[in-house]
Image (cartoon, coloured by chain):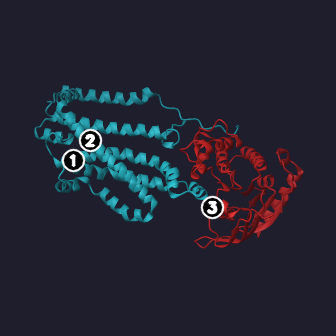
Amino acid sequence: MSEDAPQPRRRREPLWLKLGAPLVIGVLALAAWEALIYFKEIPWYILPGPIKITETLIRDWHMLWPSLLATLRVTALALLVAVVGGFSLAVLFASARWIELSLFPYAVILQVTPIVAIAPLIIIYVDNLTIALLICAWIVAFFPILSNTTIGLNSADHNLLDLMRLYGAKRRQVLWFIRIPGALPFFLGGLRISGGLALIGAIVAEFVAGGAGAGSGLAFRILEASYRLEIPRMYAALFLISATGIVIFLAFTVLTNLLLGRWHESAIRREG
Amino acid sequence: MDPLVRLTGVAKRFPNGTLAVDRVELAIPAGSFVTLLGPSGCGKSTVLRMIAGLVEPTAGRIDWPGLPEAERLGGHPELGFVFQEPTLMPWASVADNIRLPLRVAGLSKAEAEPRIAEAIAMVGLEGFAHAFSRELSGGMKMRVSIARALVTRPKLLLMDEPFAALDEITRFKLNNDLLGLWRQLKWTVVFVTHSVFESVYLSNRILVMSARPGRIVDDLPIDAPYPRDDGFRVSDAYGDLCRVVSRSLHHAIAA
């Protein structure tokens, strides 16, 4: 085969640069923060430094860890329901236009109404607190998956669809062979957004619920600490929430690269 | 002998009122290489898509005298279609792309594998079975598309300007390979192009179409002997035939 050469893959930036550059910025920022507190003599109960926050994180771990688990549980369950629900609904939408036309506006309404405004009602009506939190987080998380997957299922190559007709393919075959694989990049894009949103939904709902006790999440720890003016613990809980969000995002980025690495433009690196 | 497919008074008016194709009379004998030649937008592709059953004609009939009814149940396994774009599934390897029609037909892996390997060998893509479409050049992608069309062992291959987007050197090469496959497999081919040179090189019959509404205005036999190769491309006979066909196309556009 002497036809024009296959396109070369894009070269990666060196790993040390990709990891090192943001790391250096982070360390510098933390050092500046610590220095500011040291030289300006800001008391820790107003603005704690990174060292104090780390100490608090370790000291209060016995209390923060169960809270982290509680928040994670709600986030993960909400995301799971959002994935199953959003994906199934998208398949339903793609299979019949009238279903999409009649249901999509309500999905939008659910999406544009701020969760903080609905959460109190949900918490009043739903007895089980975990389920109430789950519903709140789900409302926020499911829409990106639904809307992205719907677009993905509907953007199949028309020539491929014609080809399937020519072969006498059944609807189910068109869905499995063409539409769903083609929708995968859209679905994964939605998943990355929903992962973060599920966490936000869970935190917002916890704030509104304000519930105490053994099963209470990180947001409640922040509320509780703020009543007692325990600023370092607020920061420690905040750090954990933020770290959770980062981990969720990175996990889905890795998943996306694993699934799309060989074929989709978004996951392929090209020679500049 | 009955023609493989016959179009009688076929017309197509699109929902927006455009009459794309009008009064097409056409009989394609088995084993022939027929080219529909015409200016852009003359309805060549529409005729091809009507033969494939992808577009319903608004008037006239399409019959398959050369094909028993039973063989055409459940889609058109007797048809292969190659589009202008390779139309590959980017998420699937070369082998999986070629497997698609066999998967739809429900062939087992054991039945499918040798046929896929055979199709890959026919288009000269040995060693690329596991490559993905984006790792291939334009010409190689088109080869995959042709392999996918021939893996079902079609009686009739419909090709809609398959090489229009390729550079000339690649196109010449694919022209030669296509002719080789046609002679080896004894298909019937209906080929659509707007290139006089390509149509003369490939076909044993050229149908010249006028601009919208598309109508067949000339039926030119190209009786240069096969096998044709690069020697034919530079021969006087080829030049003469191209001149005749160009003149006919010119009239068709002016009419």
- Residue A24, image x and y in percent? 35, 27
- The residue indicated by pointer 2 is A73
Task: Tell me residue A211's x, y (percent).
Answer: 15, 45
In the visual, does B132 lie left or right of A87?
Answer: right
Q: Quadrant of residue A74?
A: top left
Q: For residue A217, which quarter of the picture?
A: top left
Task: Tell me the cyan chain.
Answer: A
Which corner quadrant holds the N terminus of chain A?
A: top right
CB atoms of marks 1 and 2 within 8 Å: yes
Provide the chain ID for the residue under circle 1.
A
Image side of residue B148 versus residue A91, left or right: right
Q: Is residue B213 visible?
A: no
- Secondary element under disc 1, as helix, strand or loop, is helix
- Residue kind at label 3, given as amino acid type: Leu
As drawn, B57 above or below B102: below
Circles 1 and 2 on the same subunit: yes
The residue singled out by tag 1 in the image is A130
Q: Are marks 1 and 3 on the same chain?
A: no
For the residue marked with disc 1, what is the amino acid?
A: Thr
* Structural distance between the alpha carbons of marks 1 and 3: 55 Å
Q: How far is the residue under mark 2 from the one under mark 3?
A: 53 Å
Q: Which residue is mark 3?
A: B73
Using a 10 Å C-alpha cutoff, classify the residue at mark 2 as few (fewer than 14 neighbours), some (14 to 19) or many (20 or more): some
User: What is the tally of numbered marks visible in this picture?
Assistant: 3
Q: Is residue A251 visible?
A: yes
